Structure formats: C-alpha cells, structure tokens
Image (tube, rainbow, N blue to C red):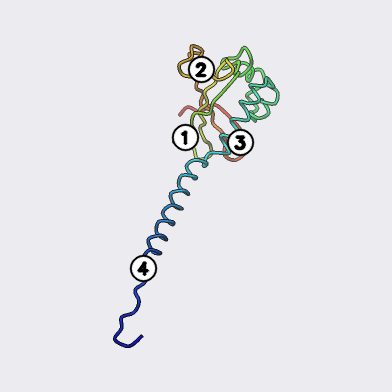
C-alpha cells in the first residue's frame, strides 16, 4: 500500500446486521412483556378455577383469601354447585388487564361453563357460558369481585 492508494473500504453489512438484530431483540422483548406481564395473576385465577372444577370448595375458598366479611356460606352461594356461578365444570381465561382506578389489582376475565369440556362457540351448550371478571391482588394473589366506583 502506498500513500496514493485508497484504503480498503469496509462493507456496511455488519452495521445493517447489528441494527436488524437490535430491532428484533426489542420487538421480542415487547411481545414477551405484553404476553407475560399478567402471568402471575392469570396463574392464580387459573389455579382457583381448576380447584373449583375438581369440586374442592374448601381449597378454593382458601385460594380466594377472603376478607372477614366473606364467609364460607357466602362463597358457596357464589361458587358452590348450586351457587350463582356454579357448578364450574370448565373454564377459559379470556383476558387480563389493569383496572383503570387500581394500581394494586389485575382484572382477569374468565369464561366459565357448567359443561366439560369447554363448549365451542357453535355448540348449543355455549349459551350457558358466563364471563366473570375477577380481581387478583398483585401483592398476595388474593381474589375478589370487582369493586364498583
């Protein structure tokens, strides 16, 4: 190489590859964050409903972590075999979101059915499917019904 020879030009492929990889990593991080940000609360709700499906209302009551004014008789009136929402034979987590006026809870919407397996949209049994909003506390995963504002 002499003084008059131009330096060897480096291709810019590595720069384009780096930008592409960084962009893909950022997109993957955003997708994972949106996909799993309410995972613990969905898991707590799922565990509660799985316990109801098995018929173990005592354990389901413990998982609910009720306050002192929500007694077992109230719980059975809501979730027992003859309760308002019962019997729960199958369920499906529909969605989860942060309620507008709460920083401490996540609202998990669950479709519950008195039939097993969970009926499809075109099935006649799907008419008895109810969607129930359940609030799950972020701190201790206690469950409750939504608080009206």
Q: Earlier in the sequence, mark 4 or mark 1?
A: 4
* Quadrant including the N terminus: bottom left
Residue at image mark 3: 141
Q: Nearer the viewer, residue 97 or 13?
A: 13
Residue at image mark 2: 129
**Is residue 37 shown above or below 24?**
above
* Quadrant including the C terminus: top left
Q: Tag 3, which secondary structure?
A: loop
Count residues near mark 4 (Cα–Cα under 10 Å), then give few for <14, some for 14-19, many for 20+.
Answer: few
Q: CA distance from mark 4 to mark 3?
A: 54 Å
Circle 4/circle 3 CB separation < 8 Å: no
Q: Nearer the viewer, residue 85 or 71?
A: 85
Count residues near mark 3 (Cα–Cα under 10 Å), then give few for <14, some for 14-19, many for 20+.
Answer: many
Circle 2/circle 4 CB separation < 8 Å: no
Q: Position of residue 56 (x, y in %)?
A: 69, 22
Q: Position of residue 127 (x, y in %)?
A: 48, 13
The residue shown at (47%, 27%) is: 148
**Is residue 47 shown above or below 10?**
above
Q: Tag 4, which secondary structure?
A: loop
Q: Tag 1, which secondary structure?
A: loop
Residue at image mark 4: 11
- As drawn, the residue found furthest toward the front would be 1
Q: CA distance from mark 3 to mark 2?
A: 25 Å
**Is residue 64 shown above or below 36?**
above
Q: Earlier in the sequence, mark 1 or mark 3?
A: 1
Residue at image mark 1: 99
Q: Which of the two discs, 4 and 1, sits closer to the camera? A: 4
Q: Earlier in the sequence, mark 2 or mark 4?
A: 4
Circle 1/circle 3 CB separation < 8 Å: no
Q: Earlier in the sequence, mark 3 or mark 2?
A: 2
């Amino acid at each position: 190489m002499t003084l008059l020879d131009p330096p060897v030009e480096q291709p810019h492929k590595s720069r384009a590859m780096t930008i592409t990889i960084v962009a893909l990593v950022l997109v993957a991080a955003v997708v994972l964050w949106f996909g799993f940000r309410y995972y613990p609360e969905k898991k707590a709700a799922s565990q509660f409903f799985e316990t109801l499906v098995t018929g173990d209302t005592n354990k389901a009551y413990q998982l609910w972590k009720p306050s002192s004014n929500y007694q077992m008789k109230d719980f059975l009136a809501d979730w027992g075999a003859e309760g308002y929402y019962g019997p729960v034979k199958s369920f499906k987590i529909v969605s989860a979101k942060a309620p507008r006026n709460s920083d401490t809870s996540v609202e998990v919407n669950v479709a519950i059915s008195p039939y097993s397996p969970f009926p499809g949209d075109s099935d006649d049994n799907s008419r008895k499917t109810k969607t129930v909003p359940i609030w799950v506390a972020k701190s201790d995963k206690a469950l409750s019904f939504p608080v009206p504002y």
